[in-house]
Amino acid sequence: MTRTARSILAVTSELPWPLNTGGHLRTFHVLRALSRSNRVRLVVPTDGSPTIAVDALRDHGLEVVPVSVGARVRRREAWRAASAAVAGQPYVFYRRHHWDAVQAELERQAMLETPDVFYLDHLDSFVYRGLLPGTPAVIDLHNVYSTLADRAAAEQRFWPLRMYLKREARLLHQRERRAMRQSAAVLATSDEDIRLFASLGGRAVLVPNGVDCSAYADLPTGRAAGMANILYVGAMSWSPNASAVVFLAREVMPKVRAVIPHARLRIVGRGATEEVKALARCPGVDVLGEVAAVQPHLNESALLAVPLEAGGGTRLKILEAFAAGLPVVSTAVGCEGLRVTHGEHLLTAERPAFADAVIQALSDATSGARLAANARVRVRELYDWTIVGAAACDAVARLC
């Protein structure tokens, strides 16, 4: 790479490898796209044993600068959370990702080569913005984090935690407003997020989440009549996902199996709680946990169910289903941020009517194939990672 290439100093909160979460996928694909025409140095904290992940990222052309910060210890994290509270800063999604060692490495990297752009991945990276006040900053906001915290609070039955999360949501909103003022450009995942960030004074650019469509090109469009496997994919450590699968297993599946007795729910995702594991005792429910590859389950299922009532950003799980030709039934929140239409690309239904929508989708394979075909065209046009990466490169190029 010639020295005339732009120098981008980037920071993120964890190694974006393996590609098993939405955050990892977005960070990896966007930074890899930027690395093709710029010099990108990615500073990232690790627990001290990152060799495999760092080597994998470097094999894909990313220049990674790992910084050992050690493993998280509960007592230290409690102290960090308390310190953030005293300082009036959010801990969730923000201060918990600040490390003195990472700050020192960023300062060292800036002295080695003055960056043209300071790239902040996630809101928590904004905690380092003050290190390079004279360098234009691009912040990639995967989500509206204040909305995530607020919705998570609404789902909490334990009132002290609910009040804590509501306070965190307010503090995160303040940080988001400050990030808008101190960033030259904001990468947003949806039109809704762009409008919100613009209302806070930000220069927001649409860089949606994406999917590698070529990885699913061999799968059929729609599924055969009579198939009745219902798939849910998501990290079970995130409470909205756990709430969604409990709803599916305990409320939706009994209604569906009363009409379609052989219907089964497959729950895929790491970090299953005891409550989620217990769902395996429900008739027609399989708790599979973390799997080596999701693609076989996308192929063997009749539809993807996404009955989320909380969350943010856009759903990579839905984009994967679209790319795989799998019909989708979702709540409005579940498909929030995607340029899709009920009855054209998927079926949308809120929880009271969700079981009926699932039964309708399972009972009409022809309609499901039509929706899946339309969705497949849409995802190839708007959400393939090659298109998303080009949008990110264009945003940075215009800034420079």
Image (tube, grey):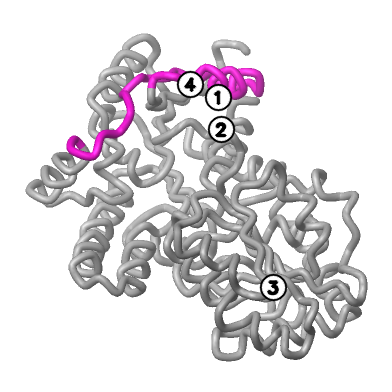
Q: Amino acid at mark 2?
A: Trp
Q: Which residue is under mark 4?
A: 50
Q: Nearer the viewer, residue 115 or 399?
A: 115
Lateral position of residue 337 relative to residue 253, left or right = left
Q: Amino acid at mark 4?
A: Pro
The quarter of the picture where residue 274 lies is: bottom left
Sequence-wise first label, 2 or 4: 2
Give the foreground label among 3 and 2: 3
- Identify the magenta region: 48-76
Residue positioned most to the front = 281
Q: Amino acid at mark 3?
A: Gly
Q: Which residue is under mark 3?
A: 284
Which residue lies at the image location 30% right of the left edge and 69% below the top edge? 153
- Distance, label 3 to label 4, CA atoms, is 39 Å
Q: Is residue 51 magenta?
A: yes
Q: Is residue 252 above or below residue 384?
A: below
- Distance, label 4 to label 1, CA atoms, is 6 Å
Which residue lies at the image location 66% right of the left edge and 23% below the top edge? 60
Residue 16 image position (x, y, % from top left): 52, 34
- Neighbour class for label 2 at 10 Å: few (<14), some, many (≥20)? some
Sequence-wise first label, 3 or 1: 1
Q: Which residue is under mark 1?
A: 53
Lateral position of residue 176 relative to residue 284, left or right = left
Mark identifier at residue 17? 2
Q: Secondary structure at mark 2?
A: loop
- Neighbour class for label 1 at 10 Å: few (<14), some, many (≥20)? some
Residue 185 image position (x, y, % from top left): 43, 45
